[in-house]
Image (cartoon, coloured by chain):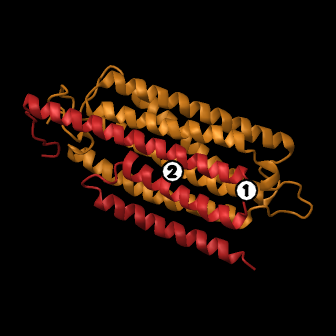
Amino acid sequence: MDLNKRYTPQTWPDHPETATLEGKNKFVGFWLLLAAETVTFASLFATYLALKDKGPSGMEFSAAGLFELPLVFAMTMLLLTSSLTSVYAMYHMKNHNFKAMQAWLGITVLLGLAFLGLEIYEFNHYVHLGFGYTNSAFSSAFYTLVGTHGAHVVFGLSWFIALMLRNAKRGLNMYNAPKFYLASLYWHFIDVVWVFIFTVVYLMGVIG
Amino acid sequence: MAHDTHDIHRSRAEFEFIKKKRAAEMRGQLTSFAMMIFLTLIAFTLVAADFSNYLIVPIILLLAAIQVVLQLYHFMHMSNKGHGVMAFFMFSGMFVAFLTVLAMVTIVWW
């Protein structure tokens, strides 16, 4: 089958992401990556929990005194909504509506950028307070955990943007449908990790 | 061959049926999203309301777990057909994740 074959909504398969062998392989491989990423983040969460509020004696920073809920709440809403907009994008992908998919992906990218902007503001604010990466075991564990998540957000956004630009004139076909689908899975996974970050780091941090 | 798939020839009725089914699924996704927002609001409210830590921590961890199940099974379609192997991967990953967190949290207990 020609991967660049043109489709209409009538001839588009129900599950374009796994309709080709290439798509199936990517799909299995990608879930395996997500399982491995789960373990990666677990090790960072475990390190953070073990080192929370620990550091040299006389350390002035603690989770309870540092974190502020309104900012975290705004970040959570942005990322959660961007997860829904990428579901909308995949809904239109399955209906073979390329323009609607691109539009929803565009909204997803904007929400992701807003999230990233708030995170940069937050880190910058902490560093200005004197809570830098090398301040304590606590600060290193915090920046490594939340920063690794932030790096995933950067990668996810770059991935979406690259796919949108590269395929802008191609339209949807059997070659790029699995790519769009996997990028959206990655984006959901980023939100899954954030659910634990806002719960374990921020909410459990604020209550001490 | 590697890229063999059968061309699909749907009748008009079949096509309309599938389209409707997808729209219904999308409404289900919106319900999941509303639940996730609701769970998040409860978690933040509990913390802001300043209840006892012994009450808050288990509840917000449970709320996070429910929200992750919604993400995985609805947004990431793990409840759909053909996701058995994916569930096996994810549960293996979560098992190792649990052991890792358990080990690191207990090692600093004393």
Question: Camera-side residue: A167 or A87?
Answer: A87
Apparent colour of chain A: orange
Q: Is residue A55 above or below residue A181?
A: below
User: In the rendered image, which quarter contains the C terminus of chain B?
Assistant: bottom right
Q: Position of residue A50 (x, y in %)?
A: 70, 67
Relative to A60, is B10 on the left or the right? left
Quadrant housing residue A19 = top left
- Could you say which is closer to the camera, residue A100 or residue B26? B26
Per the image, label 1 sits on a secondary structure element best described as: helix
Q: Amino acid at mark 1?
A: Gly
Residue drawn 47% across the image and 39% down it: A83
Query: Element type at marker 2?
Result: helix
Q: Residue at x 65, y 32 (%)?
A: A117
Out of A40 and A77, give the one closest to the viewer. A77
Q: Amino acid at mark 2?
A: Val
Q: Residue furthest bottom?
A: B110
Q: Which mark is residue A205?
A: 1
Q: Please, is residue A172 above or below residue B70 in the view?
A: above
Identify the mark nearer the N-term, 2 or 1.
2
Residue B43 place in picture, x, y as percent: 62, 52
**Which residue does the numbered mark 2 point to in the structure image?**
A192
